[in-house]
Structures are given as structure tokens and as C-alpha cells.
Amino acid sequence: MKSTHLLLGVSLLVASGCHQHPLRDYRPLDQAGVNSGTIEQLKPLNISDSEIQQVINLKHAGVSDETCVVLISAARSHNRQFSSSESVASLLGARYTESDVVDFARADKLDSVSGDAVMLRLIGLSDSTVRAVLQRDLQGLPTLSSAAIGRLKNTGLTEKQILERINDGMTEEQAEVEATSREAVRNHAHTDFVRVRGRKPR
């Protein structure tokens, strides 16, 4: 009978450990400014020590408690741990909102889209164009990389023309061909022979 009770006790301990680590130290979260209510929300998610550091990094980047919980939950919905605080900080630094970050996380594209998303801002595209390009990415539709878009823009194409090409399904290879062709025409336009007329001799 005693052995049965002992086995039952061990089973209950193991089961409870699957939901929450009994020895997890949550004090660093409190020290980072995470409120107690948020910490209680994070506990059932069984966040690891590395994720505690990730949340601390998020707080240092100015992320709200609510968004921290959503980001951890989004990672769980994709059966993995959260490890994208650096990507989040980069996106926020490029003037994306926490709502944008959450959209990327829920689509499981925080890390894959962050580099291009930041570059789209650096290229100087309008908010509407950036939104249109990223929305296609989040929907799983083909789009061009920020490098290809930047190159096309530098050849003189307008944002509207670039979006038309993206919507028509332009590939990276096709973008490279067009950019190379437009660059060649542009460079040739500046190499035409110009006769220098000097003062006629008297």
C-alpha cells in the first residue's frame, strides 16, 4: 500500500512538473519590471531560463508585458521556445509597432521576415508600400526581397511600378534581369559623345 502511494505521489509530481518547473527562478523578471500578474500568466507556459532572459531582453527593448505574453504564447502555438527578442528589437527600432511584431510572430515569421522588413524601411519606401510587400509575405504569396526592390527603385522605377511587378509575380531572377537592363541604359545615357566647342581662332 505504501509503495502504491509513493508511486502515485511521484506520478503527480512528474505531471505537475510538465506544466510548471517547480524550481524556476522568476525573480529576474520582477527585477526587469515585469509585473506579478504577467509573471503568473507566463508560469503556465513553462518558460525556460533562456526564455526568461528573452523576456528581459524584450522589456529592455520597451515591449509591453501583454506583448511579451503573446509572443511566448505564439511560439508555443508553433511548438517551440521563443528566441526572437533580437528580431523584435530590430523591428521596433525600424518603426514597426508591437501589433506588427505580433502579426509576424503569429505567422511564425519573426526571424525570417525581420531582416527584409528593416531593409524596406531603410530603402525609404512609403508605409503603404512596406505594408503591401510584407502582407504578401505573411500570406505566403511570392514577393521580392528587399535587395531586389531596392535595386529596382534605384533604376528609377516608382513604388507603384514595383508593386505592379510584384503583384504580377515577378521573380528574383526577372528582377535582376530588368534591373541590369535598366542600369545599362542609364549608364549608357551618360556616356554619349559630347563635342566640346572652343573659341574659334581669329
Image (cartoon, helix red, strand yellow):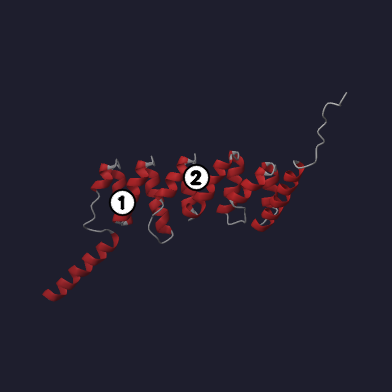
Q: Which residue: 42% across, 54% down?
A: 74
Helix, strand or loop for disc 2: helix
Q: Which residue: 76% across, 45% down?
A: 188
Q: Which residue: 66% across, 42% down?
A: 159
The residues bearing labels 2 and 1 have C-alpha atoms spaced at a distance of: 22 Å
Circle 2 packing at 10 Å, graded few (<14), some (14-19), many (20+), is some
> In the rendered image, which quarter is residue 18 located in?
bottom left
Residue 52's disc is: 1
Q: Is residue 77 left or right of residue 44?
A: right
Q: Which residue: 23% across, 52% down?
A: 25
Q: Is residue 119 left or right of residue 155?
A: left
Report the amino acid beneath label 2: Asp
Report the amino acid beneath label 1: Ile
Query: Quadrant location of the N terminus?
Result: bottom left
142 in relation to 94, above or below: below
Q: Nearer the viewer, residue 7 or 96?
A: 96
Residue 101 percent coordinates (x, y): 47, 46
Q: Is residue 111 left or right of residue 4?
A: right
Residue receiving disc 2: 100
Residue 12 percent coordinates (x, y): 22, 66
Q: Residue lying farthest right?
A: 202
Circle 1 packing at 10 Å, graded few (<14), some (14-19), many (20+), is some
Residue 147 percent coordinates (x, y): 59, 50
Residue 84 percent coordinates (x, y): 41, 52
